Image: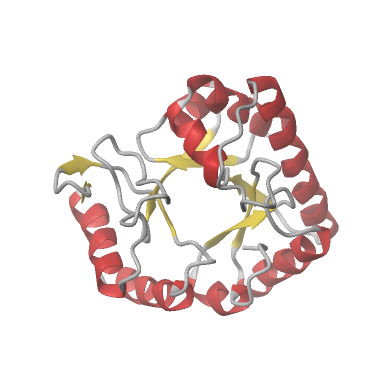
Amino acid sequence: MGEGMVNDEAIMPYITSANIACGYHAGDEDIMKRTVELCLKYNVAIGAHPSYFDHENFGRSEIDLPPGQVYTLVKKQIQLLKEITEESKALLQHVKPHGALYNRSAKDVLIAKAIAVAVKDVDKDLVLFGLSGSHSIEEAKKVGLKTKSEVFADRTYRDDGSLTPRTQSNALIEEEEKSIQQVLQIVHEGFVTTVSGKSISIIAETICIHGDGKNAVQFAKRLNEVLKVK
């Protein structure tokens, strides 16, 4: 959320938490403030969505930064949103890295640790959202953070549990029923079918839908309905 898309408010009634861009890949302080207000209006938990400084590529191109620089850029973004939430008498609940930074953290121990320490140094009570089974979750737990293992409704998986890169044609799930079936399989059976057809174990504590997806509103609405029923 907060990435300048027109459908933010339309999605809000169907979600329980929002990851708000902090200006480094999209959005700005005014958009952040408006998105926080939407979260308050719809009783949606607020999270920071820090990224590489990369407006040109929407934060989805990897930038090779040392852990110290990653720590600094993540901490600055979280602090900015935290200041905005405090002004609005709102609570910042969680942090979820965005895009290429998220994927790097999942596979790189040192980057995962840098992000985890940055989160803790801003507020030890923040929850870190990270890719299920990844270094992101492991390193956050090591520094004493609460975590939520994240799975994806609109992305496909590789055999090692990583997300299929967006550079590949089969990276996104754009069919509503396919998305629903993947989520239900993960939630109820504890595994996901990879692009090669392999079944791998996976832990689901929070489910991600990308707000910039062309079917984001409908996906959110249908998943909300199905998960309440199932």
Residue 90, compared with residue 123, is above or below; it is: below
Which of these two is toward me, 207 or 29?
29
Find residue 110 and report its image quarter.
Answer: top right
Residue 137 drawn at (x, y percent):
45, 32
Residue 65 drawn at (x, y percent):
64, 26
Residue 144 visible (yes or no): no
Residue 218 drawn at (x, y percent):
42, 78
User: What residue is rendered at 62% in x and 40% in y?
Assistant: 126
Residue 180, compared with residue 120, is above or below; it is: below
Task: Judge from the rendering whether residue 137 lies leftward or rightward of residue 114; answer left or right.
Answer: left
Residue 221, compared with residue 62, is above or below; it is: below
Which of these two is toward me, 36 or 55?
55
Task: Judge from the rendering whether residue 195 lies leftward or rightward of residue 45; answer left or right.
Answer: left
Residue 169 drawn at (x, y percent):
34, 57
On-image quarter of the C terminus:
bottom left
Task: Judge from the rendering whether residue 28 lies leftward or rightward of residue 199; answer left or right.
Answer: right
User: What residue is rendered at 70% in x and 66% in y?
Assistant: 35
